[in-house]
Amino acid sequence: MTDQHSVLVDGLLTSFLEAGQGDPVVLLHGGEFGANARIGWEHTIDALAQRYRVLAPDMLGFGGSAKVVDFTDGRGMRIRHIARFCEVLGVESAHFIGNSMGAINLLVDTTSEAPVLPVRSLVAICGGGEIQRNEHVGALYDYDATFEGMRRIVAALFLDPSYPKDEEYVTRRYESSIAPGAWESLAAARFRRPGLEAPSTPSATRAYHRITVPTLVVEGGGDKLLPPGWAEEIAGQISGGRSAVIAAAGHCPQIEQPEAVNALLLEFLASV
């Protein structure tokens, strides 16, 4: 059974889901408008909780967590917040699994000169390759807080066209995206001073040789946001790194093909 909790982390309200017992597994959701821990991991938590203590926090700006923004180091603030979240919950070492932004945050930290997350093993799902410049990325970056705008985001995230046609599913993500402070905190991260060049998309070039923990990089076979082959390329730069491609899945294979992803995750975790 998955329980919803909240805790103060350095004065910031932090909402999280928890289930199971055993070695901790921390799940980090994506960064699209309307994302949160439950939407990102509802098909994953119960499967992993059969063997592990699963923790799925809403990152800062998302879900039930504090709507705060750091205009100079937004990514670093989120990473440090998750590190402190682990400390507050007494987690000294954990398996970390991230999707999209959550995966990028994991890779940014573990390839840095001074990582702060207590990573025992790492799974990066559809986060780490060079983001494409296309209409689907545009839908994610230019969201106008309308229902049809959310439908375009859902179309960008999934390979199966039934997702954007599912009014109930789109509504659920839309309502999450317009919760008090949710749209503002994500949109604010895209603000830039007049006259500045547009920021570049997140780079896939990192010091992957610094990663020393068991690592699995997972690609969606039909991802509309990342180019084919990126997962194998990154895994090849990590000592002992592994990669896998989930067929018939877009940018969120843990939602679109949960059985295949859960089997892959359990096999990987068991091998660590």
Image (cartoon, helix red, strand yellow):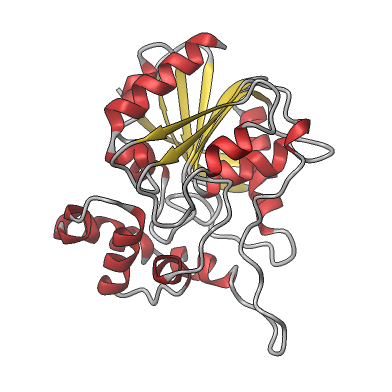
225 versus 84 height, above or below: below
Between 100 and 184, the one lying in front of the other is 100
- Spot the residue most to the right: 113
Between 148 and 2, the one lying in front of the other is 148
Q: Quadrant of residue 82?
A: top right
Q: Quadrant of the C terminus?
A: top right
* Residue 233 x, y percent position in the rendering: 60, 39
Between 130 and 13, the one lying in front of the other is 130
Q: Relative to residue 7, is residue 151 drawn left or right?
A: left
131 versus 86 height, above or below: below
For image coordinates 42% across by 34% down, the residue present is 245
* Residue 182 x, y percent position in the rendering: 45, 63
For image coordinates 69% across by 44% down, the residue present is 108
232 versus 142 height, above or below: above
Q: In which quarter of the image is residue 146?
A: bottom left
Q: Relative to residue 148, is residue 112 drawn left or right?
A: right
For image coordinates 36% across by 35% down, the residue present is 246
